[in-house]
């Protein structure tokens, strides 16, 4: 399970704090040093860790915490609250256009991150909310990707719009939106092509879609297992094309957690959902408070 190692380490630090009646400034500093190491080992961004520890330390030492009734517990609460803040505090919904207006969502990400699977998972979520989503196969480079989207769409009971690989993604997206208007699909989800690495061609293609199509939400799918690489990818995508939110996949694996704890702080963009498995139902809304509880135990 994700975060197991980080959780265990933090819980050990906190056990030590809880067992003390009173805490000195040195006790807090020693505990936070352990917290810092645990976060770095979990592959959390170095700057994020530095700021995190500094903020917790200031709050813990600067207040009446140390003299309070339950200093250990108070420090733990400060750590918890800061961790929730780090991940964005609030649960963020994908903003849909009001009424019968169409919301176009563009899914982006590197190949293998889980984009096509997540696109179908997301369609299922909208369907559950009573929407009629349309999935659009804009990856014209991999026929297998078009096929995969069709199969997953069928499993979800959601229509898939595809035009093969002879048209440009921009033309496919435009045709899909026309189709959606006629068929009452108020949510249109574009599955775009991924590449193995961030490259100029991919960025230009995504930028071209954004220039020519009224994209309401650009979502980046990243693999949590790739740790700080995922954070760097998010930074680059945001800089080059602008993203509105991130979906972290493979949080069911033994990821160390660094991506989940760094992406929001580094990019300023919210984590919307977490992929928790290969099944199309394995997508959970991302709640920073619940995630912090899961980590801190
Ligand atoms: P794409 O190239 O980004 O479109 O990636 P795919 O959607 O084809 O997914 C790549 C692989 O990751 C597939 O084997 C998926 O089943 C798997 N996958 C996607 N999301 C998750 C997840 O949340 N957890 C796990 N364990 N596997 C996932």
Image: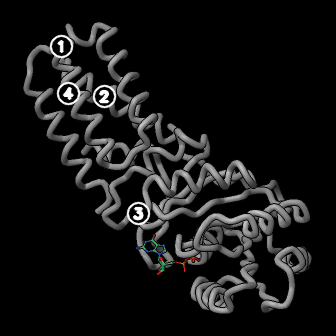
Tag 1–tag 4 contact (CB < 8 Å): no
Q: Position of residue 207 (x, y in %)?
A: 81, 61
Which residue is located at x 88 percent, y 65 percent?
A: 213
Q: Left or right? Give the position of 266 relative to 101.
A: left
Between discs 1 and 2, the one toward the N terminus: 1
Helix or strand or loop: what does disc 4 sit on? helix
* Quadrant where the N terminus is found in the figure: bottom left
Tag 3–tag 1 contact (CB < 8 Å): no
- In whole angstroms, how far apart are the C-alphas of marks 2 and 4? 14 Å
- In the picture, the disc for residue 31 is 4
Q: Which residue was labeled with disc 3?
A: 225
Find residue 84 and report its image quarter: top left
Q: Position of residue 122 (x, y in %)?
A: 60, 69
> Is residue 195 in sight in this rendering?
yes
Nearest the viewer among 129 and 294 is 294
Between discs 3 and 1, the one toward the N terminus: 1
Instruction: Name the colouring of the figure.
Output: one colour
- In whole angstroms, how far apart are the C-alphas of marks 2 and 3? 28 Å
Which residue is located at x 58 percent, y 73 percent?
A: 196
Helix or strand or loop: what does disc 2 sit on? helix
Q: Which residue was labeled with disc 2?
A: 77
Q: Nearer the viewer, mark 2 or mark 3?
A: 3
Q: Nearer the viewer, mark 1 or mark 4?
A: 4
Instruction: Respond yes or no on whether mark 4 lies under 8 Å from ligand 1.
Output: no
């Amino acid at each position: 399970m994700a975060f197991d190692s980080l959780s265990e380490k933090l819980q050990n630090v906190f056990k030590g704090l809880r067992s003390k009646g009173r805490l000195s400034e040195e006790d807090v500093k020693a505990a936070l040093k352990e917290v810092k190491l645990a976060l770095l080992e979990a592959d959390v961004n170095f700057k994020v860790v530095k700021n995190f520890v500094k903020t917790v330390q200031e709050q813990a030492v600067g207040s009446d915490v140390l003299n309070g009734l339950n200093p250990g517990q108070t420090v733990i609460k400060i750590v918890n609250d800061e961790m929730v803040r780090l991940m964005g505090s609030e649960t963020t919904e994908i903003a849909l256009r009001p009424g019968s207006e169409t919301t176009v969502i563009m899914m982006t990400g590197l190949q293998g991150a889980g984009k096509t699977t997540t696109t179908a998972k997301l369609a299922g979520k909208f369907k559950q909310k009573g929407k009629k989503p349309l999935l659009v196969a804009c990856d014209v480079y991999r026929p297998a990707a078009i096929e995969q989207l069709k199969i997953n769409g069928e499993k979800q009971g959601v229509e898939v719009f595809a035009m093969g690989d002879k048209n440009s993604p921009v033309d496919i997206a435009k045709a899909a939106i026309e189709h959606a208007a006629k068929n009452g699909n108020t949510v249109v989800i574009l599955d775009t092509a991924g590449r193995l690495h961030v490259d100029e061609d991919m960025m230009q293609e995504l930028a071209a879609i954004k220039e020519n199509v009224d994209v309401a939400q650009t979502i980046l799918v990243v693999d949590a297992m790739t740790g700080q690489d995922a954070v760097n990818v998010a930074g680059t995508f945001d800089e080059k094309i602008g993203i509105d939110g991130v979906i972290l996949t493979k949080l069911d694996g033994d990821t160390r957690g660094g991506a989940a704890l760094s992406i929001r702080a580094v990019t300023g963009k919210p984590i919307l959902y977490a992929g928790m498995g290969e099944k199309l139902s394995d997508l959970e809304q991302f709640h920073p408070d619940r995630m912090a509880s899961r980590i801190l135990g």
